[in-house]
Amino acid sequence: MTLPSAKGAAVGRGIGIGLMYGLWKPRVLGAWRVPAAGPVILAVNHAHNIDGPMLMGTAPRPVHFLIKQEAFVGPLGRFLEGIGQLKVDRSSADRTAISNALGVLEQGGVLGIFPEGTRGEGDFASLRAGLAYFAVRSGAPIVPVAVLGSTDRPGRLVKALPPLRSSVDVVFGDAFEAGDGTGRRTRKALDEATVRIQERLTGHLKNARRLTGR
């Protein structure tokens, strides 16, 4: 198995920095909460099409995101693979994607996940079990991330994108362990971990909105 390129992810971070700070005005809060080394999972709410690039450009470390395979088409697909992103088939248990994601964590990298699966309200109301599985299986801490920007103001050129040059807040929360400390990976243990994760992510989002006034 060939793991996603760590160097590629570093290049992707550089591109993300240029893109995000060139087109929008990101305000990054709490980036110091991301562990400086070792495996970590960034759990990101998903309300905008730029959430992935935004995190690549504002996180303090290069990020390997799990991205739906539909995006890996033509030149864009080759580009995403080149910057170390992970293709996942959401219609089934994608063993290759699972192995690659666990491999990133085993090598001490940063895995980015949209736990709601698809772009929606971005409120963490509906979580998939994949996040709990990766966290419990790898033992990696989870850092909740809230990306908050205005999508209801005039001036948007594309739906689900904040207006160009508008401010977007990226708020990192405290790292936490999803497991119960026993190392259990049973269905019940994963279900319980998912509940714990949802409570932490929802709480972080509320705090982030209060902090930013969004």
Image: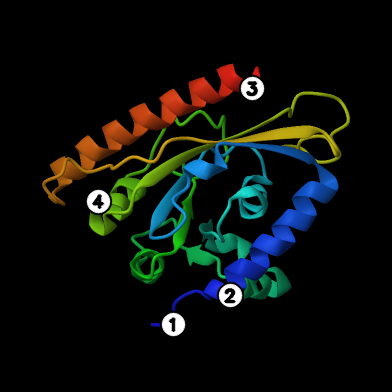
Residue 183 coordinates in the image, percent (x, y): 14, 51
For the question of whether residue 158 can be seen, the reply is yes
Which residue has dot 4 on it? 136
Q: Residue at x 62, y 61 (%)?
A: 71
Residue 79 coordinates in the image, percent (x, y): 68, 72
Q: Secondary structure at mark 2?
A: helix
> Which label belongs to residue 2?
1
The answer to which quarter of the image holds residue 48 is: top right
Residue 77 coordinates in the image, percent (x, y): 64, 71
Q: Are marks 1 and 3 in contact (CB under 8 Å)?
A: no
Q: Amino acid at mark 2?
A: Lys
> Which label belongs to residue 161?
none
Q: Between marks 2 and 1, how big is the CA–CA gap?
A: 13 Å
Which residue has dot 2 on it? 7
Mark 3 neighbour density, 10 Å: few (under 14) some (14–19) many (20 or more): some
Which residue has dot 3 on it? 212
Q: Are marks 1 and 4 in contact (CB under 8 Å)?
A: no
Q: Secondary structure at mark 1?
A: loop
Q: Earlier in the sequence, mark 1 or mark 3?
A: 1
Q: Earlier in the sequence, mark 2 or mark 4?
A: 2
Q: Nearer the viewer, residue 188 or 14?
A: 14
Q: Residue at x 49, y 46 (%)?
A: 114
Quadrant holding the N terminus:
bottom left
Q: Is residue 171 above or below residue 12?
A: above
Q: Earlier in the sequence, mark 3 or mark 4?
A: 4
